[in-house]
Image: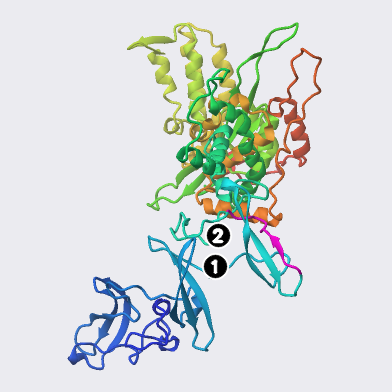
Amino acid sequence: MVAARDLEDGTAGGTGAGTLSGGDVPPGGQLTDAAAPQCPDPSHAGSRVRRRGLRASAAGTRQRFECLPETGKRHFFTTPAAGAVEAGRSPRQRCPDPWHADARVQGRGTRTTKAGTWRRFRCTRPDGSSHFFQVLASAAGTQLTSLDRPPGCPEHAVSKVTRQGVYGRGATKRQRYRCVPADGTAPHTFTPPLAREAVEVGVESCTTCDELLSPHRGALTGARHTPWTLALYARALNELSMGASYAAVSLMMREYRDRASRHLLEHHGGGALLDGQATGAAQSYTAAQGKSAWHLAADLVEQYAPLLWRPVEQQMRDRDRQQRAANDQQLAAAPNAALATPITWLLDEQPVILSGRRRRGQQRRLERNQWSLLVVVEVRWHPAEDPMSYPRREYRLRLARAYPRANEQAWRLVLDELGERPDFIVADNAEAISNAVTKQYGAGVVGLVPSLFHIQRNLRDALRKLPGATTKLEGRTVLVPELAKHLDVLARDELLNLGPADWTRWWDDLIGAVATLPAPVTGVLEQRRIYEPRVAAALPILARQPQLPASNAAVENRIRHALEPFLDNRKQLYRNLARTNFLLDLAVARAQGAFTDLDEVTRLLREDNEAAGGWAPAPRTLADAQPPQRAEGEPPPVYSSLLNPLLVAALAEQRLTQPPVRQQDGQQGGQQSGGRP
């Protein structure tokens, strides 16, 4: 690092105590005794001196040295750094080419253009070779050099490329280039696969490093024949991943595109008076623009959400595959062992009920439409600071899918898309989920833990409807003390103290308490049929794996914070199943950290479009085919793939081609062995 700093000073070939050549620096970056200055202390003559970095001071940059005498304590001293800038003097200009750090730079006058005054320099290498370069300095001190290279011609590898004007208007001006081939063929103009916006040299600067922009480094366009930049694409996809509406993101994109014309209108006048002949009713400009612009953001989702989702999905699959192999190896050695980091998923569904519509025609009746949001949250395990403590849980979105129905086939599609087999699944007591888990992985292969929170809530709600089961407490309707105390046992710590006989007795006591109200026990008997065997099978799992969650409340939390923004005031507008799932992929990708670095998002978009010659993926290929128009006067029929319940069965028949996993002879179920394969 010391040698690199010295080379950057541009003082190679000069004289002085602090000047170094490449051969004076031994391995490790320390100076030899011959290259270092003598210690100013006369008693330390001949002592070893080594460099210790640069230090800024009021007099300029100074070089810091450490003296290591044979006798006595070591100490530090400073000298003026070689090539350092003294206070009040202009810095010495260096060649912008990093390979010319050993060159001598001399001024050769100035040249004035419409961009400003360029200072001209000559760079001379030790071997006698030389070249010229120019530097344009802004008022803030940032510099632009003339050595920035234009893009190469895609047709001629050896050619001279120069700027050849711009094309486009306003904020969509693009830089054009002229190629003069070295083989003598006719010159021609070209633009790179991803063109760059034209740069106002000497005025525009980089928003990241605050340096003047090179004329060859304008903002990259998103694709050919589009007015949007790559950075705008990344920003729009980032906002869509947070739940921003299609219309809001599309209007933001238009605002960015029209910034030049907006500047002319706001700062140079125009349209100040209202025409007295104007007619019509005043309307909302934003609403009108949103109705016509929403497809801009929807097209981005259709074009680039799969591109961003693929690396995220591959990363999650690789992580699950490695964990699956490690857990299988441990269970093969000890079938009843407790896994430290089991693959654990939390499942839940969110019904999305749309407002009813009245059918037009002879029969007028309410029509109720709905679709369902199927959500999977994964548990990431982090070791506790105390090695004797249980691992800590972190919940992240793993998958979110929109289907017309949340039935068994839809959940099998979700589990099939997840890939690897989990060790445990925590879900509510929906029959669709439990049946899908059994058919997808086999009976007893995956440990299924019912959500204790949902069991207690459902029992409490059912008991409140019974006559004589409630009372008033401070104006609130609550269960009578006998029933409320009985339901308090439905907690993890309390249930783990119960054996199979105690759990059966608990239900007997609950039915007896309901009968003494007196109230009908039919509803309680039905809930006992559902909950008693599932909790009895899950109690050994919770006892052996104390770190497992006993409820899927984390799924509801993620739905509320990460997914409900996608539904607020616009859940009735989603119609296309594939595009809606692409949008949900962006939400999951954000939860997995895909939008932490927007520069990485921009890089993915750029590489994909450049590989296609600058062309973006074709948009609007996922449009739902609509039925033919009806007779005049009849309302036009509308088809929505998201509201078609028959589509789930068709997708299941197409994708679920593998037969379900069968349990081998003598193999214990996952509910008894912790997810043994």
Q: Amino acid at mark 1?
A: Asp
Q: Nearer the viewer, residue 581 or 259?
A: 259
In which quarter of the view is residue 638 placed? top right
Q: Nearer the viewer, residue 220 or 128?
A: 128
Drawn side of residue 646 relative to residue 209, left or right: right
State yes or no: discs 1 and 2 in contact (Cβ < 8 Å). yes
Task: Give SS at disc 1.
Answer: loop
Secondary structure of the residue carrying numbered label 2: loop
Q: Quadrant of residue 302?
A: top right
Can you identify the residue that label 1 sits on? 148
Q: Is residue 651 left or right of residue 212?
A: right
Residue at left 61%, top 33%? 294
Residues drawn in magenta: 186-197
Q: Residue 660, percent across and down?
A: 73, 39
Residue 428 is situated, as x and y percent measured from the top left of the image, at 56, 29
Pointer 2 residue? 217
Nearest the eye: 102 or 165: 165
Could you tell me residue 83's position as x and y percent?
Answer: 35, 80
Which of the numbered marks, if any, corresponds to residue 156?
A: none
